[in-house]
Amino acid sequence: MQKLSQHVETHKTKVNRFYDLIANGLFIAVILYTVVQWNQIPEQVPIHFNALGEVDNYGSRWVLLLVPMISGGLLALLEFLERHPEWHNYPSRLNETNAPQFYQTSRELLNRVKNLSLFLMVYIQWEIVRVGLGHSNAMSQWVFGGLLALMVVVMIMGVVQQKKIN
């Protein structure tokens, strides 16, 4: 693990701010949706879906409080790490000259992973409420799988970007 002895400034791009706005807006919207629907949500809601998106376990509707709490904790952790790219793991070729590029690339990658993770948690919460209310009988395996695949693609692209740094 290579680190520099000093902090290198990075910045959040306009695109990253836009991603933050969308993800945080959806996070707030799904919490409001859950609150508005709370009295209609049955005591038992789906707490697990199989690979086909079918419900294979139920639990208390209070689990709907757990998903936003986990999401908020994950958001806080990833936001902190995004602001401190010097804490990340870098290849041994990291030096004073290329550190700004490594750190900025890492910050942007973490921003995308953070927002996709939040979007995935929003989608899970939304589907739990919808299935619990009887508006749907399964989670879309295509949407869930697509989000996971997109996250993998984004991470691979980030690694490829870092490999291009001299």
Image (cartoon, rainbow, N blue to C red):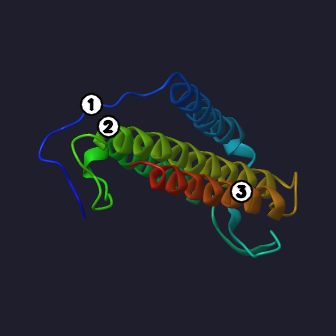
Which quadrant holds residue 72? Answer: top left
Q: Earlier in the sequence, mark 1 or mark 2?
A: 1
State the residue position of label 3: 128
- The Cα atoms of the two marked residues, 1 and 3, are separated by 41 Å
Element type where label 1 sits in the image: loop
Q: Residue at x 73, y 51 (%)?
A: 129
Q: Are marks 1 and 3 in contact (CB under 8 Å)?
A: no
- The Cα atoms of the two marked residues, 3 and 2, are separated by 42 Å
Rate crowding at label 2 as few (under 14), some (14 to 19) or many (20 or more) other CA atoms within 10 Å.
Answer: some
Q: Which dot, 1 or 3, sits closer to the camera?
A: 1
Q: From the viewer's side, name the closer residue of 67 and 150.
A: 150
- Residue type pointed to by label 2: Pro
* Position of 68 relative to 33 (above/below): below
- Residue type pointed to by label 1: Glu
Q: Which mark is residue 100?
A: 2
Q: Residue at x 38, y 39 (%)?
A: 101
Q: Are marks 1 and 2 in contact (CB under 8 Å)?
A: yes
Q: From the viewer's side, name the closer residue of 166 and 94.
A: 166
Element type where label 3 sits in the image: helix
- Residue type pointed to by label 3: Ile
Q: Where's residue 29, x and y in %?
A: 64, 33
Q: Earlier in the sequence, mark 3 or mark 2?
A: 2
Q: Where's residue 82, x and y in %?
A: 38, 42
Q: Are marks 3 and 2 in contact (CB under 8 Å)?
A: no
Q: Is residue 63 left or right of residue 57?
A: left
Q: Which mark is residue 9?
A: 1
Q: Which mark is residue 59?
A: none
